[in-house]
Structure formats: C-alpha cells, structure tokens
Amino acid sequence: MDSQLKTGFIGAGNMAFGIAKGMLSGNVLPSNIKVSAPSSRNLGRFQELGVAVTHSNTEVVCDSDLVFITVKPHLVPRVLSQISPHITDRHIVVSVAAGVTIATLEELLPENSIVIRLMPNLPCVVQEGALLFARGSHAKPEDGALLRSLLHCCGLVEEGPEAWIDIHTGLSGSGVAFVYLFAEALAEGAVKMGMPSALAHSIASQTVLGAGRLLRDSGRHPAQLRSEVCTPGGTTIYGLHTLEQGGVRASTMSAVESATERARELGRMSAAGSAK
C-alpha cells in the first residue's frame, strides 16, 4: 500500500533529497514522488533520480497523499497559507521545519488536518539518518506506522512526544555538525604530528564511522566501550585526560543544550509569526 502512496515535497533542500533517496532505496517508485521549489537550482538532482519536479506547491499537494513540508521555518506560515485550501482529509502533512510546533501547523491548516512533525538529519542522504517524529492531535497510530514504513530505509526512525523533537534537533540534527568538527580536529591533530592531510582525514572519517557502528550494533553504553580502549598507563587514557582538561564533555553537553534552546526559540518565533 505504502509503495503506491503519492508523496510530495515542498522544498528541495538536503532534507527533502535525503528523505526521497531513502524512500527510493526501499519500495517507492520515482513516479510516485513529486517535488516543488521556487527555483530550479536544487531540482536537477531529483530529476536525476527520475522524480517529477515543478515550481507549483499547489500541484504537489493536489497530486499527493503525503506532503512533506521541507522549507525553512520562517517560510512555513506562507507555504501553509498557500496550500491550505487544497488540503483534504486524505492528506497527511509532515513538517520537518525546526522549531515549528504541531499546534502552529494545525492552526495554519484546515480543521482536523492530519499533521506529523518530523526531525531527520543530514545522514539520511546515505540512508544512515536518525529520525524522530510526533503525531498531531488528529493523526492516528496507523498514520505513524505508515510514515515509519516509508522512511525505514532512511535510517533509525522513532516516535516520541513532541517535547522530544527540539531535543532531537540539538542532539542529532545539529549533532552531526558537532561530530564533523571533532573529526576535523582529529585529523588536524594527526597532521600536526606529521601525517599527510588526505590520509589523516580519511583515517579520521573511518574512525568516526567504525566507532559509531560499533556503538550502535553492540548496544553497549559508550562508557563501556571507552573503558575497553583504555589500558593502564596507555596512550588513550593520556589523550582522554587532555580532552577532559579541555572540557570536551561539558562543552558538548552545552552545545546540545544551546541547539535545543535555539530550536525552541524558532518555534516561539514561528508561533508569533503565524498569529499575526
């Protein structure tokens, strides 16, 4: 059933592309997806996947059962006011706009609209994403199950209360950039010690990948795995001591906190904008 569902994307950025690629790697056909954007700048890569593109948001809505809103948060009120007359009880509207609450979405759409708020992250483009969604007041468990089925090839897909969405934004949406910063620093440390830059960056990326897969697949707490790498008086404990002196743990926790608070702030700004 879900393989025949007509899916539309309003917005053609990285999140839309990652989700579409994940869906296509499953059992969804390119002919069942349509994407709209005001310019053609990002539409070419969708066309290369065999996906239909348009500049009309209304066309996407009228041709779709499931509609992803993948525009910047400040554009959501404008987009929803445009498409609202065309939303029917057959539609499921999924928003990936950071900070835009379910209450705001439901207020801007027709009464009883089925709304789901979703937060993916960039690794969706390689089907290794972490996605969390929350159902609106009119979305049934089967609507969530349908979304999970469509997105399972994008990576880890979980459902939770809306209060967790902004936290997930800080942890995983923004956290991807935190990991890249750490990987960059790892490589630069090796360059400082005399390793060629290309090799250092290649090894750093593989180190992050390998550590992440082991952490995920083992199901063990990070502290357990970390302790196994540390031998008494060895190189790793010396390095960890230096990281702790630099406050890496506290800084990382504060970074997640800051990103989460910013997501909440965006939500308040969006709600205030929609009320005008």
Image (cartoon, rainbow, N blue to C red):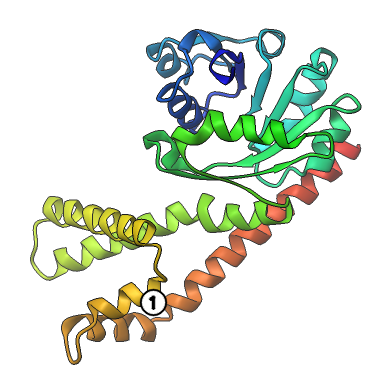
The reply, left or right, for residue 257 in relation to residue 129 is right
Q: Residues within 10 Å of mark 1 (few under 14, many from 20)?
A: few
Q: Residue at x 88, y 28 (%)?
A: 112
Q: Residue at x 88, y 24 (%)?
A: 110
Say what amino acid the circle numbered 1 marks: Ala
Report the number of discs.
Answer: 1
Element marked by disc 1: helix
Please state the horizontal and vertical placement of residue 238, each as a whole percent of the image: 23, 86
Please state the horizontal and vertical placement of residue 152, each as a whole percent of the image: 49, 35
Name the residue beneath numbered marker 1: 223
The reply, left or right, for residue 2 in relation to residue 208 is right
Q: Is residue 70 visible?
A: no
Quarter occupied by residue 49: top left
The reply, left or right, for residue 46 in relation to residue 230 is right
Quarter occupied by residue 258: bottom right
* Figure check: 113 above or below 217: above
Q: Residue at x 77, y 34 (%)?
A: 140
